[in-house]
């Protein structure tokens, strides 16, 4: 098989980052030295927020820090070696959210971003500027330049920002639905549709299907771009053995009436031949019994080890996804 020269990955934060690092490694192993030209990552901006006057982009930052190698791998988010002096001071002021920690180095990122947004740069231009600081080995694009921050709505008509529901309440309050205000008016960020159209393969990272991949696919024009590209579209299940690996994706799936299983998430994305977005779907050996259900959807089912324990297993998973279909 020829080496794919152009790979696009749709990704959320922490799960997305592990997979994207794997893709970058897999491309290097395939002899593609210039991964910056080969790899485009479309980042979820659905869980972005304004807090204490600054713009936070959790998934964009997780991807940036991971690709730069400056992320805190033990804690799982933020910058390695960060301190929290400013956060303590904000708490003394009663500013921000006491349950939401902002590291000092992280705040530097948010201040820089907010300043550039205030200067009139678009989120795409801001991310391009931020990406130039490090050797990321990938081009990072936000899914859209429109603010579409996720709001969780409850059956009693109350609502809160997704980050409050996730971080403060640990997803313990049963959501009625997830809403992305303004998404109807959003468009894919500049460069996203072209990258998908010109790709040799498009990969859906094993990110949260509801609040990471869901908002990306909900940007008007995004699913059409995936349906129209000549590149195969391959997804990786975030559900292994009928369970979420970590996080609270099962609560999110239940809220939209989707069972926590690899086949149910495949059905949510749908077969490209049936108006959905997938050509192939990677499931774990633990979920072998669901293979036929995936195939019945019109999606090729590929069984592979889905656990991303370290760089080697992440790269092996990425390689399995890249070679799932012949291109
Ligand atoms: P977030 O934006 O930081 O919440 O992260 P993502 O949405 O990118 O990823 C969260 C999802 O990654 C969860 O639903 C997990 O099930 C999934 N995940 C985490 N680690 C692994 C792994 O090793 N393998 C697979 N297949 N999925 C994983
Ligand atoms: Ca996220």
Image: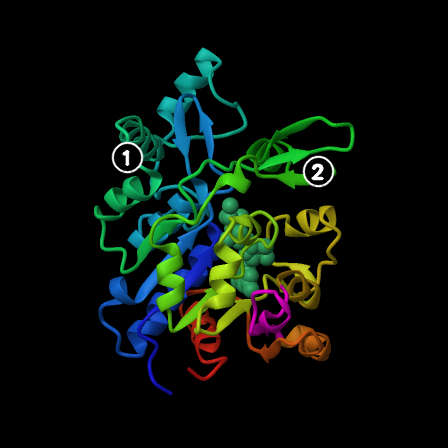
Residue 154 to residue 322: above or below: above
Above or below, 224 relative to 109: below
The reply to whether dot 2 and dot 1 touch (C-beta < 8 Å) is no
Residue position marked by numbered label 1 in the rendering: 121
Residue shown at the point (30%, 59%) measured from the top left: 138
**Residue 49, position as x, y percentages in the image:** 47, 32
Name above or below for residue 322 compared with residue 16: below
Vertically, is 127 above or below 246? Answer: above
- The residue nearer to you, when weighing 167 against 265, is 265
Residue 281: say if magenta.
yes
Which label sits in the foreground, 2 or 1? Answer: 1
Snapshot quadrant of residue 89: top left
* Mark earlier in primary sequence (2, 1): 1
Secondary structure found at label 1: loop
Quadrant where the N terminus is found in the figure: bottom left
Residue that label 2 marks: 172
For residue 321, side relative to residue 109 (left or right): right
Answer with the quadrant where ligand 1 appears in the image: bottom right
Q: Position of residue 327 (x, y in %)?
A: 42, 82
Residue 46 image position (x, y, % from top left): 51, 42
Q: Is residue 186 toward the left or the right of residue 33 in the image?
A: right
Please give the name of the residue rendered at 34% of the width and 66% of the height, measured from the top-left corner.
24
Instruction: Give, as a single range, the part of the protein colored magenta.
Output: 270-284
Whole-number angstrom distance, CA of label 2 to CA of label 1:
37 Å
**The one of 135 and 235 positioned closer to us in this rendering:** 235
Q: Secondary structure at mark 2?
A: loop
């Amino acid at each position: 098989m020829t080496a794919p020269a152009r790979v696009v990955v749709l990704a959320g934060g922490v799960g997305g980052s592990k997979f994207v690092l794997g893709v970058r490694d897999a491309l290097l192993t395939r002899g593609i030295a210039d991964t910056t030209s080969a790899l485009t990552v479309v980042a979820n901006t659905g869980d972005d927020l304004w807090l204490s006057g600054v713009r936070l982009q959790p998934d964009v930052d997780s991807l940036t820090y991971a690709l730069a190698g400056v992320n805190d791998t033990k804690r799982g988010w933020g910058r390695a070696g960060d301190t929290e002096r400013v956060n303590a001071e904000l708490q003394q002021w009663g500013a921000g959210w006491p349950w939401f920690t902002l590291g000092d180095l992280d705040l530097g990122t948010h201040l820089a971003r907010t300043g550039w947004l205030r200067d009139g740069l678009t989120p795409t231009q801001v991310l391009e500027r931020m990406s130039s600081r490090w050797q990321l080995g990938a081009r990072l694009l936000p899914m859209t330049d429109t603010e579409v921050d996720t709001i969780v709505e409850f059956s009693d008509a109350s609502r809160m920002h997704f980050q409050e529901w996730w971080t403060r309440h640990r997803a313990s309050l049963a959501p009625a639905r997830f809403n992305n205000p303004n998404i109807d008016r959003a468009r894919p960020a500049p460069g996203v549709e072209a990258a998908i159209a010109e790709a040799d393969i498009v990969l859906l990272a094993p990110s949260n299907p509801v609040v990471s991949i869901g908002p990306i696919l909900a940007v008007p024009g995004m699913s059409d771009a995936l349906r129209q590209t000549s590149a195969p579209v391959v997804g990786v299940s975030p559900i292994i053995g009928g369970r979420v690996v970590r996080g609270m994706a099962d609560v999110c799936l239940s809220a939209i009436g989707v069972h926590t299983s690899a086949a149910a998430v495949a059905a949510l994305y749908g077969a490209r031949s049936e108006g959905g977005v997938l050509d192939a779907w990677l499931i774990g050996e633990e979920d072998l019994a669901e293979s036929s259900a995936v195939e019945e959807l019109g999606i090729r089912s590929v069984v592979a080890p889905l656990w991303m324990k370290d760089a080697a297993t992440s790269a092996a998973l990425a390689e399995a996804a890249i070679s799932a279909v012949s291109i």
